[in-house]
């Protein structure tokens, strides 16, 4: 899942600027799981902005909408349609959601969250980055732990010389990814995997080649199929 956190209320107020009619759009998927953009967070932000408007006699008109996802055009279109009377859409989805809504909306779409990483909840209220999205996954060699994302230096063939007692030298509150890799491989009786040399990383599938795209040719609609789908919508 994508991890995000809400922008400071002062920044959100600054982003809204002189706009009076604001639609706050929530996401019931990733942003909801990390307690940043679900139904409750939409309502809480709406109340906070409404109070700020009242105290400062701004006359803001704030409405709310939440969809299962913002990162699909069908849901994004529904949000855009519900914003017909708004001046601006404030998205509490990730940066992907903001862009999808803006593609189909005739009014500005502003981000209410800061998108951080791909990860998941370690425990309630604590979210940890798990994947670097490098495009060349080698988790089968590292005990299911991503050294790109979880090692502060993205070391590929073992720890640096600075880790101590299973902790990273960059931040003593962060576990050493390679210590965790060792412990996991030991638990799985796969320590022999550590003898394999991981070759230099192929960064071509990563962001080094520009914006990435995956094309599933068997799933791409023909022009006739696209017309049929548009007719059904």
Image (cartoon, rainbow, N blue to C red):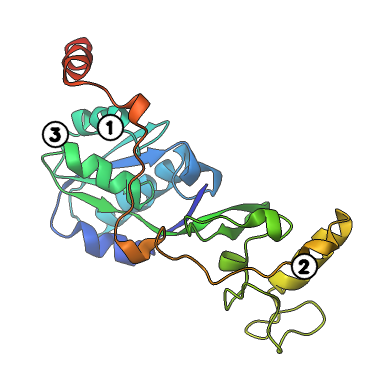
The tag earlier along the polypeptide, 2 or 1, is: 1
Depth check, front residue: 135 or 145: 135
Relative side of 127 to 54, left or right: right
Depth check, front residue: 211 or 54: 211
**Front label number (2 vs 1):** 2
**Front label number (3 vs 2):** 2
Categorize mark 3 by other alpha carbons within 10 Å: few (<14), some (14-19), many (20+): few
Q: Residue 196, located in which quarter of the rendered image?
A: bottom right
> Which residue is the site of mark 2?
194
Q: How far apart are marks 2 and 1 (CA)?
A: 44 Å
Q: Is residue 175 visible?
A: no
Q: Distance between the residues labelled 1 and 3?
A: 20 Å
Secondary element under disc 1, as helix, strand or loop, is: helix
How many discs appear? 3
> Which residue is the site of mark 3?
85
Q: Is residue 51 depicted above or below 79 in this figure? A: below
| Residue 121: x %, y % from top left | 63, 51
Q: Is residue 38 depicted above or below 160 in this figure? A: above
Depth check, front residue: 162 or 52: 162
- Which residue is at a point 24% across and 65% down the rendered structure image? 14
- Name the quarter where the C terminus is drawn: top left
**Front label number (1 vs 3):** 1
Secondary element under disc 2, as helix, strand or loop, is: helix
| Residue 17: x %, y % from top left | 17, 60
- Which residue is at a point 14% across and 52% down the rendered structure image? 19
| Residue 12: x %, y % from top left | 30, 60
> Which residue is the site of mark 1?
73
Relative side of 97 to 102, left or right: right
- Which residue is at a point 42% across and 31% down the rendered structure image? 68
Secondary element under disc 3, as helix, strand or loop, is: loop
């Amino acid at each position: 899942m994508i991890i995000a956190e809400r922008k400071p209320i002062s920044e959100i107020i600054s982003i809204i600027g002189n706009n009076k009619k604001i639609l706050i759009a929530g996401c019931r998927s990733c942003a909801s799981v990390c307690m940043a953009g679900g139904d409750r967070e939409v309502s809480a932000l709406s109340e906070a902005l409404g109070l700020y408007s009242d105290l400062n006699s701004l006359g803001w008109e704030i409405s709310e909408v939440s969809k299962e996802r913002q990162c699909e055009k069908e849901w994004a279109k529904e949000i855009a349609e519900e914003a017909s009377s708004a001046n601006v859409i404030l998205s509490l989805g990730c940066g992907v959601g903001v862009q999808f809504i803006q593609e189909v909306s005739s009014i500005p779409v502003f981000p209410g969250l800061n998108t951080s990483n791909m990860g998941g909840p370690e425990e309630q209220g604590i979210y940890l980055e798990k994947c670097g999205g490098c495009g060349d996954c080698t988790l089968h060699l590292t005990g299911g732990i991503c050294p790109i994302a979880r090692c502060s230096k993205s070391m590929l063939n073992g720890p640096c010389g600075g880790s101590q007692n299973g902790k990273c030298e960059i931040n003593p509150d962060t576990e050493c990814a390679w210590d965790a890799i060792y412990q996991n491989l030991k638990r799985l009786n796969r320590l022999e995997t550590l003898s394999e040399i991981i070759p230099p990383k192929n960064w071509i599938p990563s962001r080094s080649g520009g914006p990435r795209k995956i094309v599933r040719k068997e799933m791409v609609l023909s022009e006739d199929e696209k017309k049929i789908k548009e007719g059904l919508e």
